[in-house]
Amino acid sequence: MPPMRLFAPLLLAAALLQATPAQAAEPGTATVTPVQVTGSPAKRFNLIIMGDGYTEAEQSAFAADVDRHLNVMWSIEPFKSYRTYINVYRVDVVSGESGVSCDPGLDAPRRNTPLKMGFWGQCNPGSVQRLITMDNAAANRFANLVTGTSSGNRQILALANSKTYGGAGGSYATASGSNAMSALISPHELGHSLGGLQDEYDYYQRGVPGGPYTGPEPSSAHHTLLTEDQMRQQQKKWFRWLGEPSESGGPIARFEGGMYATTGVWRPSKHSIMKTLGYYFDQVSREVMVQRITAKTDVIQDSAPTSAPVGADRVLWVQPMHPVSHSLTTTWNVDGEDLPGDVDSLDLRTLGLTPGAHTVRATVTDPTDFVRSPAVRAAITKTRTWTVDTTITTPPDTSAPAFTASTPTDRPVGANDVVYVETNRRADVTWKLDGRPVGTGPDLDLSKAGSGTALTATTGSQTLAWTVDAQKPTTAYELSKPLLKPAEDTYIFNGPVDMRLTGADDRAGYVVSESRVDGDGWFNYFGWPTSSALPWHFTETGTTIDSLVYGKLPRGRHTVEYRSIDATGNYGRAKSFTLTTIAPPPPCTETITGVRRGPLTVTSGVTCLRDATVSGPVTVKAGGSLVVDGGTVSGALTASKAAEIHLLNATVNGSVSLSATTLTVVGAKLNGAAVIGSGILAGTTVKGALVCSGGQVDDLGAPNTVTGASACRGAVQSKALAAETGGEYEAVTGSTEPEHGSDEHGH
């Protein structure tokens, strides 16, 4: 369906007088572009996305923002599975000014834009900076331009032309268009506006603790005052999900804080999208979202007429909805007895009905694992009932078989999608994949159809065709320069770690990349909160940005998994790398570079050798510290009761005897005999004998090579530590290979 230029009512007359093909559009001019149409607006949930503060020259930027927001949303359940329940329309509203009001502060300009969007709740000093509100009446006027939609079957999402973090959820949802995290603000705010979900923050104003919750048991489905035992005993709140791994990481349990209160109220997960942008909805919130999305449409879209008795020579049929991830089930019942099978039509002629009247029912149920509540299950289950009279005869239907609706054919379908068609009079349908018959009926589960890229469905003389996107997206990762890379996809760091993920696909559309650490929840990779162009930055204590902490990574060994999801919804194969973070060296009190001739003695403080060469022996006295970062010590190296010794990718040609409170030897070359105490000895070559005179020695999973005799056999081993870190950007890279075939999910 091509875009069509429409106009807000107040501007209609002026625009008609002035509009010519060559002249610029007037402010307030609106173009409605169908982005995804899966059915009649009257039978779908309609998401209407409009922009504010985008000039005519910036409409392509608005379209790109919408593409990114949608593809992130389609990667998050239940939007991913129920994508076909949703029509999406983009309303390109032309603004006379670029940007929105009070962005980023109250001292910023007020702008005259069609939706009057602004931070600080439209420039209210009593509000909060990140709250973006708008003129709801104006938003409704633009939404009314989308024919067939109404307040009952649509949701408005307005994007502000801004790179500043912000949004709001109420009757309508708002978000900034191009902030690093803005595509995650949209599903969060839709959680409010569409799902009625509450914030799980323990603050309202960032940096100001919310204090204790003092109210009664919340009506919120994902907040409670009950203990886990009370939830189970009373069968309330999320008792059906307790103990299961959360979709957003950790278990479904009871975590204190939420609804802007720090204490006294509990939520189901440590972090979900209603608390921390980047994670998924947990099962509790996801179930609510399934209920709200499906409530905007009918589980049974159409059926054979039920208003009058029908003859026993009829074929009865129902037309269920079609999720992307699975098929709905249809059960037929005749006079109180269920019939076997799961089909959408019933030929009454095959039943051998006795003369007289009979009652036939078709019940359509959504078997999704996302729902456990009987009440929600009942809400997504519908029944149609017919009276069958054997004395009635029906004239034959002579209309030609024809398609009436289908999975959209103007975009590829995923290799694991359920693709559907709808026909008049329940005509027969034949499916072929690369010319090979693969099924009949109204839908086809591609995950069971085998490989292929050209899909067709035929009924009568009509054929529909789709391209199957069987190519998985790939993901490349880059890390800052490590202290040591002992093996492929294995790294050791003693400082901050920068990580960049880059998703790629063979087709157009924004590719969503994700990572997870040590099996925690999958986390959307949006770059760094201050700029999507910057890599993610891990440190031991994290980085505080606008009173929130990002990138905190405990010191020790971690497995980082990564993957991408393409615009079609295909998951790339998850791969992983391992990084181990250790304590950084202490700050230098003296730094030596270049060549140092003769002996060197460290009596106190921290002496650092940076790619230096010391021609004589080096001695570290009790309480002193030495950091050798690269370079060479030509003589012996001796430390007795030193505070800290760090030999990092350094060479020692003489003998080594090291006793220190903190001992870290990584990637070193010790060309003589070595006696060490307890500490870290990793990825190091010892060409002489090695004696471990202290306690535990940790190789961090990077084996050492000892060519002489060793008294450390069995002592040089890997063990988990416990802290966090980060680094400097460089060419340490890895990537997934292109993959075909079945989907590989798995949190």
Image (spheres, rainbow, N blue to C red):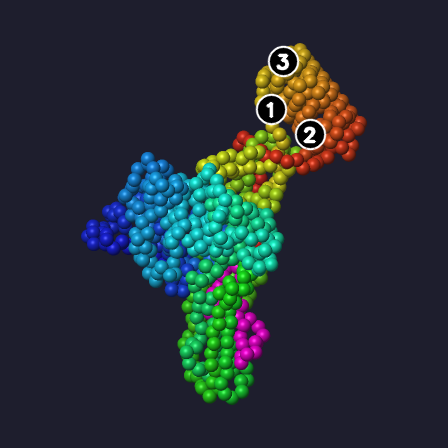
Q: Report the amino acid beneath label 2.
A: Ile
Q: Is residue 332 magenta?
A: yes
Q: Nearer the viewer, residue 373 or 108?
A: 373
Residue 587, position in %: x, y?
58, 22
344 lies left or right of 492: left
- Is 576 magenta? The answer is no
The image shows residue 216, relative to residue 533, as above or below, that is: below
Query: Quick one: which residue is furthest to the left in this view?
Result: 17
Q: Earlier in the sequence, mark 1 or mark 3?
A: 1
> Could you give the CA–CA distance between mark 1 and mark 2, rounded to whole angstroms?
16 Å
Question: Residue tagged by mark 1?
Answer: 586
- Left or right of 717 in this view: 278: left
Whether the residues at callouts 3 and 2 have beta carbons within 8 Å, the answer is: no
- Residue 204 % position (x, y): 44, 43
Q: Which residue is mark 3?
A: 596
Q: Which residue is denoted by mark 2 in the rendering? A: 680
Q: Residues within 10 Å of mark 2 (few under 14, many from 20)?
A: many
Whole-percent x, y for residue 483 in the image = 61, 30
Disc 3 is placed on an element classified as: strand
The magenta stretch is 319-345
For label 3, the crowd category at 10 Å Cα-Cα, with few meaning under 14, some 14 to 19 and many 20 or more, is some
Residue 357 sits above or below residue 301 on the image: below
Residue at x-position 60% and y-position 36%: 554
Mark 1 crowd level (few <14, some 14–19, many ≥20, 10 Å Cα):
some
